[in-house]
Image (tube, rainbow, N blue to C red):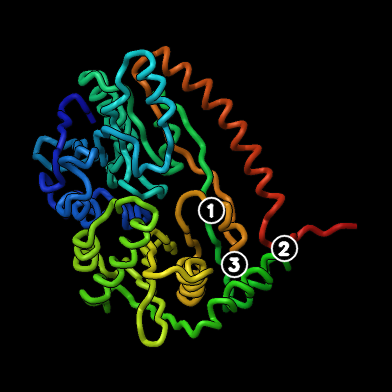
Amino acid sequence: MNLEAFKPRIANSLADVSALQWNGLLGEDSGPFLKYEFLKALESCGCVGEDTGWQVAHILIEDKQSRLIAAMPLYLKSHSYGEFVFDWAWAEAYAQHGLSYYPKALCAIPFTPVRGTRCLVGKESESGQLQQALLETLKTLVTQNQFSSAHILFPDLSELPKIQEQGFMLRDSVQFHWHNAQYKNFEEFLSHLTMKRRKNIRRERAQVGGMGIEYRHIPGVESTSHDWEFFYRCYENTYLEHRSKPYLNLAFFQALALSMPENLHLITAIRDGVPIAASLLIVDKGASKAYGRYWGALEHIPCLHFEVAYYQAIEFCIDQGIQTFEGGAQGEHKMARGFIPSTIQSAHWLADPQFSLAVQRFLEREQQGIAAYVNELEEHHPLKSTKVLL
């Protein structure tokens, strides 16, 4: 393929392409967050775009017949909120030298720290060349517009070699994931934990259980507008209690309920017939994964968060045979609930050579610290040891 014959362009909205074209670039393991329906809902409901600091600038590559053959979800950021990879210190260093760090180019799923494909090339035989073309276009966009940098958050492992070939530096971060060892039920899962972890979980569940709280699981295809209005009340209230504003609005969740209900699963907590809390799982049955992204409550009840957002979700995964449950970014407290640390990467390219060198040195030191941190976490592993000693 002669890539010079194809001129990349920037789309300021997913409305520039059809759902069929965009989704046609997704592999079977791309997951729900890259779906046209998910990204389009973020745009059409005002969660990204305009004055949010997330200016839409998706990279598209088409062939001579105007057929979309490659794409990259891209945003121009005027801040670093909603990314889960923290570069505020880099922005401060730029400012101290009289330079502007923003806007920067960000290839990511907004507000969603999930690993996945970032160079969408479908099943093209020239997929490697198209990946290269997308990455080169990304860097060209940065230099031509005099932006500071380009960042690719949580790309798929298979993409890392191509990304590094283009001069991007990798940065490690740690998440906590739950893994299903073919457990028959929650008690069998508990039996695989250390005594300390097992007793802690039983104590927390008993504490909430003594309050007469029941739980209702609602598949997305069975959800109602009332269910989503209640969920959003909980979600918004929890943000307000922390004196912040939620990134996502009710219209976004309602749009997902209409366009991709098969990927949604609501869990509500009910006391004396009155709903008091809710959490939402994004479910990818094809990849056997569930993602805990959103939770909220109308009142504070000790340990209710752990029950609704973790334990009920784990029971759902066991019942459905789902292999992995990702409970969100960060949170060492998840280890006490049976989650295991996992190292994932982001990739960064800075246009200024001196700043790039400084960041490279910083990342080398940070990587050593992350490795030591993960080693330390392993000493507190929640699962029983399987080592056989003589």
Is residue 54 visible from the viewing direction of this image?
Answer: yes
Residue 281 position within the rendered picture, expressed as x and y whole percent measured from the top left: 38, 65
Q: Which of 354 and 161 is in front in this view?
A: 354
Q: How far apart are labels 3 and 1 at the CA level?
A: 16 Å
Residue 178 position within the rendered picture, expressed as x and y whole percent measured from the top left: 54, 61
Q: How far apart are labels 3 and 2 at the CA level?
A: 13 Å
Q: How far apart are labels 2 and 1 at the CA level?
A: 17 Å
Residue indicated by mark 2: 384
Is residue 317 visible from the viewing direction of this image?
Answer: no
Badge 1 crowding class, 10 Å Cα cut-off, few under 14, some 14 to 19, many 20 or more, is many
CB atoms of marks 3 and 1 within 8 Å: no
Q: Earlier in the sequence, mark 2 or mark 1?
A: 1
Residue indicated by mark 1: 176
**Circle 3: element type:** loop
Badge 3 crowding class, 10 Å Cα cut-off, few under 14, some 14 to 19, many 20 or more, is some
Q: Which residue is drawn at 49% across and 85% down?
A: 212
- Looking at the rendered structure, the kind of residue marked 2 is Lys
Q: Quarter-wise, where is residue 215 in the image?
A: bottom left
Badge 2 crowding class, 10 Å Cα cut-off, few under 14, some 14 to 19, many 20 or more, is few
Answer above or below: position of 115 versus 305: above
Quadrant the C terminus occupies: bottom right
Q: Quarter-wise, where is residue 121 in the image?
A: top left
Q: Which residue is drawn at 67% across and 43% down?
A: 375
**Foreground mark, 3 or 1?**
1
Q: Nearer the viewer, residue 247 or 254?
A: 247
Residue indicated by mark 3: 181
Q: Earlier in the sequence, mark 3 or mark 1?
A: 1
